[in-house]
Image (tube, rainbow, N blue to C red):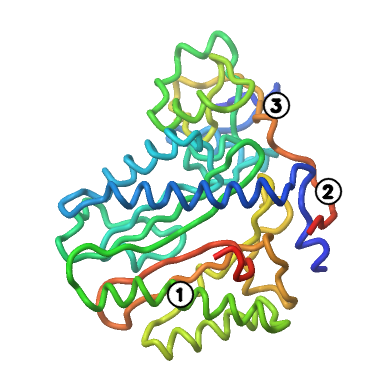
Amino acid sequence: MNKDIEAVGPDFDKAKMLEMRDKTRSVIYEIAANVYPGMLQEDAVSMAKDALEKNEMVQGWHETLVRFGPNTLKTLGASSIPVVTLKSDDIFFIDIGPVLDEWEGDGGDTFTVGENAEMQRCAQDVRRLFHIVRREWLTTRISGKSLYQFATREAEKLGWELNLDWSGHRISDFPHEVIYNGTMADIDFRPAPLLWVLEIHIRHPTAGFGAFYEDLLLDDSYF
Amino acid sequence: MIIYAAGTPVPAQSGDTVLGALQRAEYAINTVCGGKAVCGTCRIAVSKGWVKNLHPPSKDEARLLNVLKGGNYSHRLACQVNLDWSFDGLTFVLDPPPNRRRLVMSNTI
């Protein structure tokens, strides 16, 4: 079963997938650098699309997301609250899934502006949790399903709720959906490196914000 | 109304997108991004006489159509073509870009 779920297409190329990963993360930081307090989320999404175009990554496999403040609570596929402006102390995340030539990228990260310590902790903890979970994957033979159970417990230890609507997926040469359109949390075997994206979306249990981070499942040498 | 996908009649309603009408009719069409004008897999080639009758593409649709391989003036994204009754009889063929790949069941890692 894992052989089918972890199949790749004829254009799969390890070096190209890693190159796409680097380009994806580079554009995320380019977008983040152009987000500022007072900006409308809709304008940030438009700016993000322009940045992707500038980097020759107009085609994607999922829509471009920039979510501000209360919209950072929104789950996968949910529409954002319209006309949200980034406040002077605020949090936002970016999630892009570009396709360049035959290869898919996928990356997400969270950023803060201003001095809100809880928001800053949320943005730091989502990266921290990503690596806690990734190292558990790296050092054990844990299945995708157990990995997200582990992630849920670890998120709670840090004081956050883990949103399992975002629970990992395949990545490959475009489009991975024809191979497997389910989540990593649904698989009962250990996900292989470079073929999966580990997604972590945490939410504050009471305050109206959250954070998101995702990257490929890879060993420490890639971070 | 009826629209024609490669000659196959497909029932449609005003307010549908072409993609929505095709999906409701269980016509085989790819969509990866879910109708967000992002993936380009639902690209269609509209028959010559119909091209000028369609509303102009949005910025997102035009930008994507411009970069998809093998593009031409008749191409639109099925997810972005909104239908009203004036489109009764619309004819088109599916013309997805070439980077829809074949599935090879092997793991190269």
Q: What chain letter is assigned to the residue under label 2?
A: B
Closer mark to the observer between disc 1 and disc 2: 2
Q: Residue under circle 1?
A: A163
Q: Is residue A48 above or below residue A95?
A: above
Closer mark to the observer between disc 3 and disc 2: 2
Q: Is residue A167 above or below residue B47?
A: below
Is the C-beta separation of discs 1 and 3 under 8 Å? no
Residue at the limit of the structure toward the front, as seen here: A221
Spatial separation of the CA atoms under disc 3 and disc 2: 30 Å
Q: Nearer the viewer, residue A15 or A179?
A: A15
Q: Residue under circle 2?
A: B104
Q: Residue under circle 3?
A: B8
Spatial separation of the CA atoms under disc 1 and disc 2: 33 Å
Spatial separation of the CA atoms under disc 1 and disc 3: 43 Å
Q: Are marks 1 and 2 on the same chain?
A: no
Q: Which label belongs to residue A39?
A: none
Q: Amino acid at mark 2?
A: Val
Q: Residue at x 58, y 79 (%)?
A: A148
Q: Amino acid at mark 3?
A: Thr
Element at label 3: strand
Percent position of residue A180, x then y: 70, 58
Q: Residues within 10 Å of mark 2 (few under 14, many from 20)?
A: some
Locate the C terminus of chain A by quadrant. Answer: bottom right
Q: Quadrant of residue B3?
A: top right
Q: Is residue B55 above or below residue A113?
A: above
